[in-house]
Amino acid sequence: MTDRLTPIIIVGARGRMGKTLIREITISDSMVLEAAVDRSSGPGLGMDAGRIAGLHDLGIAVTDELRPRRSSVVVDFSLAQATDANLRRCQEAGVPLVLGTTGLHKTTRELLRAAAKDIAIVSAANFSVGVTLLTRIAGLVAHALGDQWDAELLEIHHSHKRDAPSGTALRIAKSIAKATDRDPETSLRHDRADPHARPRERGEIGVSVIRGGDSVGEHTLMFLTDGERLELTHRATDRAIFARGALRAARWVVDKPPGLYTMSDVLGLAGLS
Ligand code: NAD
């Protein structure tokens, strides 16, 4: 890691995450906004990126062309359909990519793996540092507790969320399944509230869902056994946590060799078993 400011290019600059990323960069003392990119249609193209983010002018106009300079890092929170083209640009320019866009197509995932032979890429569906840790320690704890403990996960999100359970809840449950040699396809149980539900079976991983209000996202993992209960909770109160995590990844990846990395790598957790 050097002392120089890391130049960051934001793709999806006019979006909710793009604006949050721009705000976080301007208050950082280790990064500088190099460029702000968004699609060609829609309002705001040519406008100052700082203005769009609700700040003062930064002297950087939002453009529809991604032209990375070799020393910069591209941080892309835009649209799954745009990922292939953005990835190609980064590969051609030889610059690292931090990819937060979700809903990636299978063929895009294959392209990511191929491009990671040439450039360093950090891809994560959830850049929260806390959620990354919770997902990682869920497996470690489940493994240590053994099969006399029941695992139950409860997630809460705002009323507009479409998918249930959340992708994060599924990843936490799968992390438990993997660490305890259970089949993630068959061991997850979603029907606790069903009037015809059968009693709990040993080895199940229960996943329950609550929707309402403006909750940014809560995940509570419970391990229950006779006489005691262990609970691990992550509570998100501000979407800026995803931007901060992604920018932490951008500073980390800037001098890394080509490869496909996760937030666990960024946090130094990947080697832990
Ligand atoms: P948004 O709809 O507010 O913003 C998306 C932006 O991308 C828009 O400004 C849109 O114009 C722009 N865009 C669309 N096509 C483009 C293209 N071809 N080139 C450049 N820009 C383009 O959405 P959002 O809430 O900011 O989320 C963006 C993405 O990030 C989504 O996929 C979302 O699921 C994901 N996300 C990931 C995390 C994480 O931690 N990984 C956290 C939050 C959101």
Image (cartoon, rainbow, N blue to C red):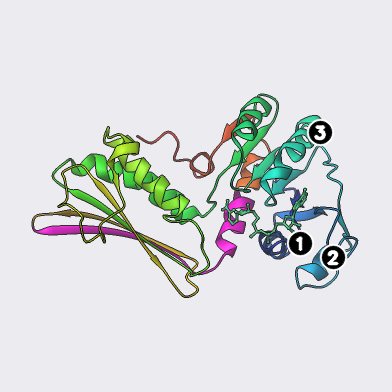
Amino acid type, label 1 = Arg
Reading the image, the residue beneath label 2 is 43
Q: Nearer the viewer, residue 148 or 189?
A: 189
The earlier-in-sequence mark between 3 and 2 is 2
Which residue bears the numbered disc 3? 93
The answer to whether the residue bearing label 2 lies less than 8 angstroms from the nearest atom of ligand 1 is: no
Q: Return the mark for residue 14.
A: 1
Image quadrant containing the C terminus: top left
- The answer to whether residue 231 is magenta is yes
Point 64% across, 44% down: residue: 99
Residue 185: image location, x then y, percent: 35, 37
Image location of residue 175, percent across then percent down: 36, 41
- Give neighbour class at mark 2: few <14, some 14-19, many 20+ (Cα, 10 Å): few
Quadrant in the picture for residue 210:
bottom left
Residue 95 in sight from this viewpoint:
no
Q: Circle 1 sits in a helix, a strand or a loop, which is it?
A: loop
Q: Is mark 1 within 8 Å of ligand 1?
A: yes
Q: Which residues are magenta?
A: 227-248
Whether residues under marks 1 and 2 lie with C-beta atoms below 8 angstroms apart, the answer is yes
Q: Is residue 107 left or right of residue 184?
A: right
> 10 Å neighbourhood of mark 3: few (<14), some, or many (≥20)?
some
Q: Is residue 82 magenta?
A: no
Furthest toward the bottom, the residue is 213
